[in-house]
Image (cartoon, grey):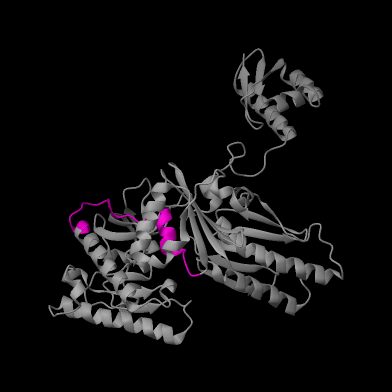
Amino acid sequence: MSEEILINVSPHETRVALSENGVLQDVHIERTRKRGLVGNIIKGRVYRVLPGMQSAFVDIGLERTGFLHVSDLVETVEDLEMESVAGALTENSIDTLLTEGQELLVQVVKDPIGAKGARLTTRISIPSRYLVFIPNHAIIGVSQRIEDEAERERLRQVCAHYQSDVQAFALGGGGAAVLHTIKPETARGGFIIRTAAEGVDEENLHRDMDFLLKLWGSISIRAKNTFAPALIHEDLPLAIRTMRDLTHGEVEKIRIDSKETYKRVMEFSKHFIPDFLGRIEYYSGERPILDLYSIEDEIQKSLDRKVQLKSGGHLVIDQTEAMTTIDVNTGAFVGHRNLEETIYKTNLEAAHAIAKQLRLRNLGGIIIIDFIDMQGQEHARQVLRTLEKRVEKDHSKVTISEFTSLGLVQLTRKRTRESLEQILCEPCPTCNGRGSMKTPETVCYEIFREILREVRQFDGSKLLVIAAQTIVDMLMDEESASVAELEEFIGRPITFQVEPLYIREQYDIVLL
C-alpha cells in the first residue's frame, strides 16, 4: 500500500491530506484564527461544581467554560496509584474533591463543538513521536496495535530500565547521566508506548523519554508561576503533529508547498524521525498541491449528503447533533444474478465506502447504519466483518455492535475535534439548519391568519403586506380569490409590496 501525505499551507489555514494509491483517505484542516484545543494544557479555575451531575464547569479563559466529569479527575496525592484512583472517585462526590474558585491543571481532550464547551481531564498526557508521558503514575503501557509479544516485552523492558534510573535519580541516587538537567520533583511518571515505537532502538526511545521529562518539568514550573485561567502548554501546529502522529513505514513521501513549513518539518524530523528526511520534499509545482489526485474535488464531495458507489448504489449521510445516520441504497445497481446477490454486493461496497467516509468527514459520536435488509445470516456476518476490518486503520477508536433486531448497525467513533462539515460549513441562514422550508401556500395562509389577528387588535383603514416575490405572486394569482374574500370580511383593502431581501418565510403586515 503506497501512502503519501500532502501538506498545503497558507497564511490563514493549513490542510493535510493522506492518500493511499492516489485515493484520498483522510483530511485535516486547521485555521489560524481557530486552532484546535485538543492536547493543550491549561491552568483553570473551578467555576461551578454540580454534585447532581458529578461534574464541574471550569473557567479556561474561553467564551464557554470547560466540562470536567468526576471520572476525568485525578486526586493530587503523591502515593495514590492509578488503580486506586477509580475506587476513590466512585466513593467520593465531586463536591468533596473540588471547590468553586479552586485552581487546577487540566488538559483539553475534546474541542468545543456546537453549543458544548471543551471536555477536560486532569489526567495529563504528553505525546512525542514514540511515547506518551503520564505524569505522577509509574506505569508502562504498550499500544494494542503492536501484536508481536516479543517486541512488546522488549519495549516494556526499555521503559522499565529507564524508570528505574529515573526513580534512583529522584531519590538522590546516581541514575542515568542524561537526567542531570531534570528536576527530581518532576521526574516521576510513566509511559505509554505508541505504535510508531515498534522496532525502534533503545537510544531513540531514551531520547524521547528525556525530551518528555524535560518538557513536563518546564510545564510544571510555568503552572506554579501562573495565575488561572491561562494557557500553560499548546500542542504542536498541524504540520508538525502530522509528522508526529501520522507518519509510519508505509508513508513513501511527504510533500509540503510552503518553504518555511518545509524547513520546520525538516528540523523536527532531524531530531525525532531522521529516517524520514529522505521522504520529505518541498513542492514547488505550478499546479496547486491539493489538485494532485483530485483531492480538492474529493473534499468538496465530502460535504454532499449523497455518496455514489461504483456499482450504481449510493449512501445518504445525515449528520445531526444527536447522531449521524447512514442509509444504503441500491440506486441504479440491478445486479446480474438475483436480488439477494445484488443486495449483498451493494452492502459490501457500502461497508468499504462507510469506513472511508468516517475518516474523511471525521464523523464522531453515535453512528447508525441502515444496510439493505439481507435474508442470509452469513451475508450479514460478512458485511459486518468487512466493516470491522476496514475501520482497523482508523486513528480514532471505533466500536461496532452486531446487527440489531431492526437490521441496523450501531457504532461509536471517538470524537475529539469538529467534523469536516462543522469546520467548513454553517447552518443555512434561510432554513436555520432545518433542511426544509414552508411552502408558499403555507406562508400565504399564515399571512391570512395574521391579518385577522391584526384587525381585531388595531384600527387602520387599509393593510400593506410586505413579503418575498414568490409569496406576493401567489397572493395576487392563485390566492387572489381568497384575498378578495378576506378584504370583504374585514372591510378593508389589502395591498402588497415585494421586498427582495426577504426570504420565503419572512413577511410583515402594516396597518395604514
Q: Quadrant of residue 211?
A: bottom left
**Considering depth in this image, is 276 or 397 the residue closer to the camera?**
276
Q: Is residue 426 above or below residue 44?
A: above
Residue 187 lies, in percent from the top left, at 21, 72
Q: Is residue 228 magenta?
A: yes
Q: At x 44% / y 42%, what residue is drawn? A: 12
- Kindly tell me whether residue 214 is visible in this rendering: yes
Q: Is residue 441 above or below residue 162?
A: above
Query: Which residue appears farthest toward the bottom when viewing the image?
Result: 150
Using residue 363 as the reference point, say whether residue 256 is left or right of it: left
Q: Is residue 2 above or below residue 449?
A: below
**Considering depth in this image, is 74 or 142 the residue closer to the camera?**
142
Residue 251 lies, in percent from the top left, at 51, 65
First to last magenta residue range: 222-249
Placement of the C terminus among the 4 image quadrants: top right
Using residue 51 as the reference point, say whether residue 481 is left or right of it: right
Using residue 171 as the reference point, say whether residue 233 is left or right of it: right
Using residue 180 as the reference point, say whether residue 399 is left or right of it: right
Residue 88 lies, in percent from the top left, at 31, 75
- Kindly tell me whether residue 373 is visible in this rendering: no
Q: Is residue 486 magenta?
A: no
Query: Which residue appears farthest toward the right when viewing the image?
Result: 337
Residue 214 lies, in percent from the top left, at 24, 65
**Considering depth in this image, is 340 or 133 the residue closer to the camera?**
133
Placement of the N terminus among the 4 image quadrants: bottom right
Q: At x 49% / y 55%, what residue is drawn? A: 255
Give the number of callouts. 0
Q: At x 53% / y 54%, what residue is drawn? A: 419
